[in-house]
């Protein structure tokens, strides 16, 4: 039970960060669209997996950025590369989620 408590505390902390909050808001909007389009179970499986993957990776990215800022307060080219690569990982997963959403939504709308 203690591990769950710690995990929920971490989720609460993550939601205080703008980038994570933006992803959660976009996820809620996407879920609303999914309900409107009446996704089937397989579509929901892909859709929800993509949403959770983006949010989870955004949380990891935020942790990496905070850790880098903790380790080196001043600008550092090596730290910049680490942060940029972490952000790139989020971008790739977000693009994947967008493709999944587009494929499902276009199919649902008869395209």
Image: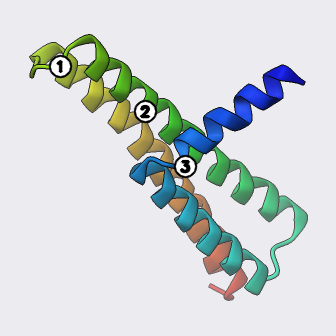
**Residue corresponding to mark 2:** 61
At label 2, counting other C-alpha atoms closer than 10 Å, the crowd grade (few under 14, some 14-19, many 20 or more) is many
**Structural distance between the alpha carbons of marks 2 and 3:** 13 Å
Q: Secondary structure at mark 2?
A: helix
Instruction: Give the label, 1 or 2, closer to the camera.
Output: 1
- Residue drawn at x 11%, y 17% is 76
Say whether disc 1 or disc 3 marks the residue closer to the N-terminus: 3
Q: Assign the C terminus to one quadrant of the image.
A: bottom right
Residue 73 is labelled as 1
**Residue corresponding to mark 3:** 15
**Structural distance between the alpha carbons of marks 1 and 3:** 23 Å
Say whether disc 2 or disc 3 marks the residue closer to the N-terminus: 3
Q: Toward the viewer: 103 or 87?
A: 87
**Structural distance between the alpha carbons of marks 1 and 2:** 17 Å
Is residue 42 rendered to the left or right of residue 67?
Answer: right
Q: Assign the N terminus to one quadrant of the image.
A: top right
- Residue drawn at x 70%, y 59% is 47
């Amino acid at each position: 039970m203690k591990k769950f408590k710690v995990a929920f505390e971490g989720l609460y902390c993550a939601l205080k960060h703008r980038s994570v909050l933006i992803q959660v808001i976009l996820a809620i909007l996407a879920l609303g669209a999914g309900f409107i389009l009446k996704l089937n179970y397989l579509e929901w499986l892909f859709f929800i997996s993509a949403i959770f993957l983006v949010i989870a990776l955004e949380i990891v990215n935020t942790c990496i950025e905070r850790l880098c800022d903790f380790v080196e307060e001043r600008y550092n080219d090596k730290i910049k590369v680490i942060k940029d690569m972490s952000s790139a990982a989020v971008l790739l997963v977000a693009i994947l989620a967008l493709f999944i959403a587009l494929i499902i939504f276009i199919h649902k709308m008869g395209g």
